[in-house]
Image: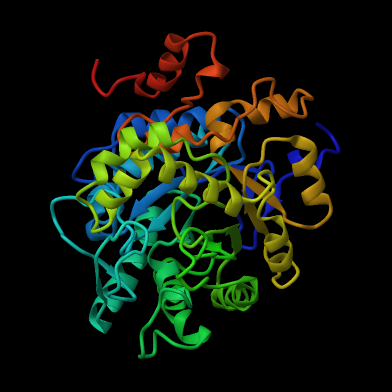
Amino acid sequence: MPGDIIFEPLRFASGLEVKNRIWRSNVSGRFDNFDGSGNQARINWEVKFARGGVGAIVSSFVPVTIRGRIVPNYATIHRDEAIPFWREVGRRVHEHDCRFILQLSHGGRQRDLPGIEFDKGLSSTDKEDPMHGFQCERMTREQIAETVEAFGDGARRAQEAGLDGVELHGANGYLITQFLSSGINDREDEYGGPLANRARFVLDIVRNIRKKCGPKFHLQMKISATESNNAMSSGEPRGNTIKDSVPVCQWLVEAGVNAIHVSSGGSFPHPRNPPGDLPIDVFLKTYDSMVSAGTKTYRNYQLLRNKITGALFRNRWLKQRGDVIEGINLADAHAIKKAVNVPVICTGGFQTASIIRQAILQGQCDSVSIARSLIANNDLVLQFKAGKDRPAKPCTYCNRCLVNAVENPLGCYEESRFESHDAMIRQIMSVFDPPPFR
């Protein structure tokens, strides 16, 4: 569409050029093998969105170490043997003139379903996660150095695979957030205390990536600009605010980051990420698999099963979410954009072309990333290109997709959007076509 900012290319100092301003945000199901090797379903998943017209795809959470994964059956980048698989993912995505950014990740203490290899996660602290009671060990300096190297090696492998860049997952309560957060990091060494110390870990990672990949390999950072760690527990410190995140983003850019990806929430899930409903009925069907994962998970399961306490929990969730869903992080994105000289990508419930267009034209961000609304409408970008402002069957923000993803294939589980239950199941199962073997 000539003259439409949504369909104008976005260029970065790294040399990366993305054909439009809509990215598929980091999201995926448990499509891969237990040992971290990739599967055909993962390729099918990514190609769905490349074919649907997005300019770039940010992979789902890709662990840089086995101990850093949040659930089994997510493809990793922790060894050189992973390079051929990711090369094939990139090749298939590139066939649709779409760019592929691999998200380098480490869960730290936030691990929904630990594998069989380790009992505890690694973190900036030795305090367990307050919501689920996921236990952890306080990282030693040696473990910090090893993890910094693991992120650098992950970036090097992505570069060797011919991918278009990497994103550091520094948001939503995962390991980098656990170091950045004033509400989580309780260290008394050079990696804790003042903001500059808490940012040391991620800045070490950025410098290591630049050392191993050079100055021109695209590198971006996803950050929870406002954490609100106390959203569901009044006794918890709130963590970082936008006033903390602005200087962190400036330091990241000085160290060599080419773009900032703005999110929110000091945990995942969080009332403000993904903003929407909390379907208690579905939550109970999948949360049972997590009952042994943390010291508080069984308690949570029992509270959610109770109609009164379950309703109270959901009501607090909705209150903390607030009334705005689409563009929920735009104010933070705007504050960061005014402070840095690199493009800013904003996530948060987008699915209306006019809202996206206005956000970019008003200088609040340069691009948006979308997950659930693209799961609901894989061809959302093509619908925008055809002149639609909003899809005929928009995402309802019910969050059934993400709650199901713990146990079931990822897809849209809002049956009201389909002609029948069978039609919904066909859409969900389409990720397995073509199969790995014929």
Q: In this view, does 429 lie above or below 404?
A: above
Task: Out of 173 and 206, give the one closest to the viewer.
Answer: 173
Asked whether residue 58 is in view, the answer is no
Q: What x and y, as percent, mark residue 301?
A: 30, 45
Farthest-out residue, front? 308
Asked whether residue 117 is in view, the answer is yes
Left or right of 83 on screen, residue 20: right
Q: What x and y, as percent, mark residue 331?
A: 72, 60
Q: What colouring style does the render use?
A: rainbow
Task: Out of 231 and 176, give the one closest to the viewer.
Answer: 231
Farthest-out residue, right? 3
Name the quarter where the C terminus is drawn. Answer: top left
Taking the spot 50% from the left edge, 65% from the top edge, the residue there is: 230
Q: What x and y, as percent, mark residue 317?
A: 53, 49
Left or right of 226 on screen, residue 366: right
Name the quarter where the N terminus is drawn. Answer: top right
Taking the spot 22% from the left edge, 52% from the top edge, the residue there is: 293
Total labels: the figure holds 0
Task: Out of 176 and 381, give the one closest to the viewer.
Answer: 176
Q: In this view, does 287 lie above or below 221?
A: above
Task: Out of 163 and 151, give the one closest to the viewer.
Answer: 151
Farthest-out residue, bottom? 189
Q: What x and y, as percent, mark residue 252?
A: 56, 74
Left or right of 261 on screen, residue 120: left
Left or right of 400 on screen, residue 175: left
Determine which quarter of the picture holds residue 402.
Answer: top left
Determine which quarter of the picture holds residue 73.
Answer: top left
Determine which quarter of the picture holds residue 403.
Answer: top left
Q: Is residue 4 above or below residue 257?
A: above
